[in-house]
Amino acid sequence: MAKPAIPKGTRDFTPEEMAKRNYIFNTIKDVYHLFGFQQIETPAMEMLSTLMGKYGEEGDKLLFKILNSGDFLKDVNSDDLQEKNINRLAAQMCEKGLRYDLTVPFARFVVMHRDEISFPFKRYQIQPVWRADRPQKGRYREFFQCDADVVGSNSLLNEVELIQIIDEVFSRFKINVAIKMNNRKILSGIAEIIGAPEKIVDITVAIDKLDKIGLDKVNEELRSKDISDEAISMLQPIILLEGSNRDKIATLKNVLSASETGLKGVEELEFILDKTDTMGVRSQLDLDLTLARGLNYYTGAIFEVKALDVQIGSITGGGRYDNLTGVFGMPGVSGVGISFGADRIFDVLNQLNLYPSDSLKTTKLLFVNFGTQEETFCLSVLQKLRKEGISSEIYPEAAKMKKQMGYADSKKIPFVALVGANEMAEGKINLKNMTTGEQTMVTVDEIIEILK
């Protein structure tokens, strides 16, 4: 019989790993609540008409499509089938797809529920997403995103607040990060200045890959998109701009002086820097002109977070997407959001061993099972302990002591309760500390005091 397997790019999680993941989710949730965000959920699958065309050509290729129920071939054109025209076949066989991210479903949610929510609407959402990507270290086909978005407000204070959220979350995790920021209006302004405004998407998709493939390969890709050598040459000093954030702002004001759109982007970034300077943000904040975030729907500020002590891709990203709800028939609603990559954060915390010991929640006390009478006594004590919020359990059978103690060790249970005839007669419990080996006769109230 073949050994069972799971799809590449997916993972199982053990109880210990789930405790770590819940620590991540709960930390992020706590910070979201701190800033007034409310939780929603959307379905795992969306209509393909909702998803297609929202992520650019590259993103569309990474959508997992779901075959229609029943006879999915009944509406298929026989010529397309003969020619194996994959795109046309997919359009005829699939109406639904697994969500690629949480932002587009959120935009759809806002449009569908516009009469039930008040604006500005601050929502957060923690759910899995799926991408038909090539699996590699830090890149999965199924992974969780932890999004926070604000829609219905044009204020740049929202961007400032999202930077504060990023800073607070990673400060709680004790992960040193660099928050990289840019503005799509600046990138549009650069495209104008070099005489290739119609190539903005090609330019941003290419320069977004600078960290991964290097400058020469980026330039090759730009040439392949029919961008002239002169325009590429003008692009180089802008992409490789150095100096402090304020130095870069000053240079950009000069370089983009002829572009109204570009100067608007510089003004927005300057506002964000001015406000974050007064907030005492602990994380490193870098203006990075190579940051483009290839998704087509960003229109203003864009963010990406890199861990400084671990080699891994972006662990948080986001930006402003003024026009997103417009594609669903609701124009004029501005939005801005961020997404924490929980799976990559999980890997970073593992590599740096940064989980607090109390985050790995387990049973605090195991009652050894000596037989029927002892069971009855222990069950009444267990009820009292659980009412006090103390996680405790009894071994379900009167097995050999070695087996029961091995069970406690395997679950990393810190205390074991030994209750025999003598203990029942005295109304006490023999409490064993599994770390020190020390045993003490205590009352139920004393156990509660020790374990709480």
Image: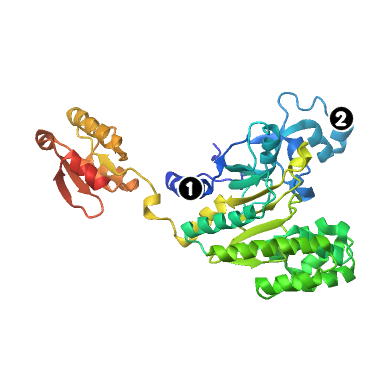
| Residue 223, horizontal then vertical, whole percent | 86, 64
Q: Nearer the viewer, mark 1 or mark 2?
A: 1
The Cα atoms of the two marked residues, 1 and 2, are separated by 52 Å
Instruction: Please name the residue shown 25% across and 50% down the image.
Output: 434
Q: Of helix, strand and loop, which one carries label 1?
A: helix
Residue 209 seen in the current view = no
Q: How is the image coloured?
A: rainbow
Residue in front for this viewpoint, 133 or 208? 208
| Residue 62, horizontal then vertical, whole percent | 72, 46
Residue 434 seen in the current view = yes
Q: Of helix, strand and loop, which one carries label 2?
A: loop
| Residue 134, horizontal then vertical, whole percent | 67, 51
> Is the Cβ of the residue at disc 1 closer than 8 Å to that at disc 2?
no
Q: Quadrant of residue 428?
A: top left
Other-residue count near label 2 (Cα within 10 Å), few / some / many at <14 / 14–19 / ≥20: few
In the rendered view, tell whether residue 303 sits above or below residue 387. Answer: below
| Residue 104, horizontal then vertical, whole percent | 70, 42
In the rendered view, tell whether residue 403 sits above or below residue 68. Answer: below
Look at mark 2 in the image and give the residue it sits on: 77
Instruction: Answer left or right for 125 relative to 16.
Output: right
Residue in front for this viewpoint, 308 or 242? 242
Other-residue count near label 1 (Cα within 10 Å), few / some / many at <14 / 14–19 / ≥20: few
Total marks in image: 2
Residue in front for this viewpoint, 406 or 22? 22
| Residue type highlighted by circle 2 | Asn
Instruction: Please name the residue shown 67% across and 76% down the image.
Output: 243
Query: Quarter holding the C terminus?
Result: top left
Look at mark 1 in the image and give the residue it sits on: 30
